[in-house]
Amino acid sequence: EEVILRLKRLCKERTAENYTTALNSFRRFRGGEDISLDEMDSDLMAEYEAYLKSHGITMNSVSFYNRILRAVYNRAVEKEMTAQRYPFKHVYTGIDKTVKRAVSLATIRQIKELDLSSKPSLDFARDMFLFSFYTRGMSFIDMAFLKTTDLCDGILSYRRHKTGQQLFIRWEEPMQEIIDKYPVNENGYLLPIIKSPDRERLQYRNALRLVNNKLKNIAAAVGLQAKLTMYCSRHSWASIAKSQNIPLSVISAGMGHDSEHTTQIYLAALDNAAIDKANSWILKKLK
């Protein structure tokens, strides 16, 4: 709880949310009973891992919880609040390969052409999915916090919440078509995700939950067997760009990926026009 409060003071809201999720999971395992740091050992953590598996938690999520708890435990060790007993030595803290989340350009076109005029909630979910795809796989949190002032002289600029990296995207016609469908927000938000500056993150989380839920219906409508989420738009843009032999360096820069130091040096010199050209080509293929 102390670490979570510190993260909030540092304005690392997303990380604080992740730590809270891990804490709540461990509390459920413990039946709500506290435990002292000195009682944390490898046997206990092995039991916790077995508990997670028995509840159908994926190995990546198991690792996610274990790594967060390990980080907090190691912090306590550094503060000399307990001795190092290496309680996470025998539990999983790696990363499994995830199931492919990309969908084809043909599927994106099917989604775009669906008639959802009589289903506003599905139409909204479809618009948010497509807007993310149009903007090179922009994450939902970055979309939610866009302001009208971020769009200037045909260029949309924003900083990624995840990395702080600033990205520039040439404004394209399909993006404007989505904006034109919704009333202008009096509080200056570009998209109809956050309506007011009060409890912004709660509004963002509720909207993301709604959109991902409605995307299930959209997936069914186009006969898609795979799970469709907002994150699929990001994977799909990269996958489609790669299939058209667009250089990996252009794709990485376009999505604002962090990378190893040497790659970052190379990407820093990349002409932004090459990224915009790649995005324009992909959007034209939808027409």
Image (cartoon, rainbow, N blue to C red):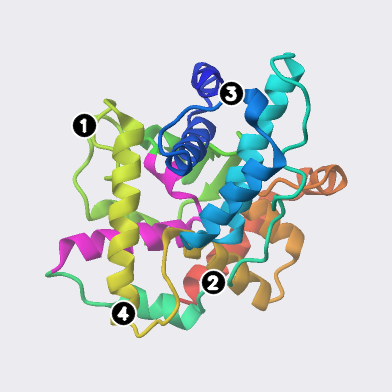
Q: Is residue 232 visible?
A: yes
The residue identified by callout 4 is 220
Q: Is residue 91 above or below residue 71?
A: below
**Residue 104 is one of the magenta-drawn residues:** no
Residue type at the position of mark 4: Ala
Between 67 and 271, the one nearer to me in the picture: 67
Residue 70 at x, y percent in the picture: 67, 36
The residue identified by callout 2 is 102
**Side of 232 relative to 187 (left or right):** right
Q: Residues within 10 Å of mark 4 (few under 14, many from 20)?
A: few
Depth-wise, is mark 4 or mark 3 nearer the camera? 3
Q: Earlier in the sequence, mark 1 or mark 3?
A: 3
Specify start and end residues of the magenta stretch as a single range.
119-144
- Give residue 186's mark: 1
Quarter of the picture holding the C terminus = bottom left
Res. 40 image quadrant: top right
Q: Earlier in the sequence, mark 2 or mark 1?
A: 2
Q: CA distance from mark 1 to mark 3?
A: 50 Å
Q: Earlier in the sequence, mark 1 or mark 4?
A: 1
Residue type at the position of mark 1: Glu
Q: CA distance from mark 2 to mark 3?
A: 44 Å
Q: Earlier in the sequence, mark 2 or mark 3?
A: 3
Residues at badges 1 and 3 in contact (C-beta under 8 Å)?
no
Identify the residue shown where x is 70% and y is 50%. Answer: 91
Disc 2 element: loop
Q: Residues within 10 Å of mark 1 (few under 14, many from 20)?
A: few
The residue identified by callout 3 is 36
Overall secondary structure of the magenta section: helix
Q: CA distance from mark 4 to mark 3?
A: 48 Å
Residue type at the position of mark 2: Ala
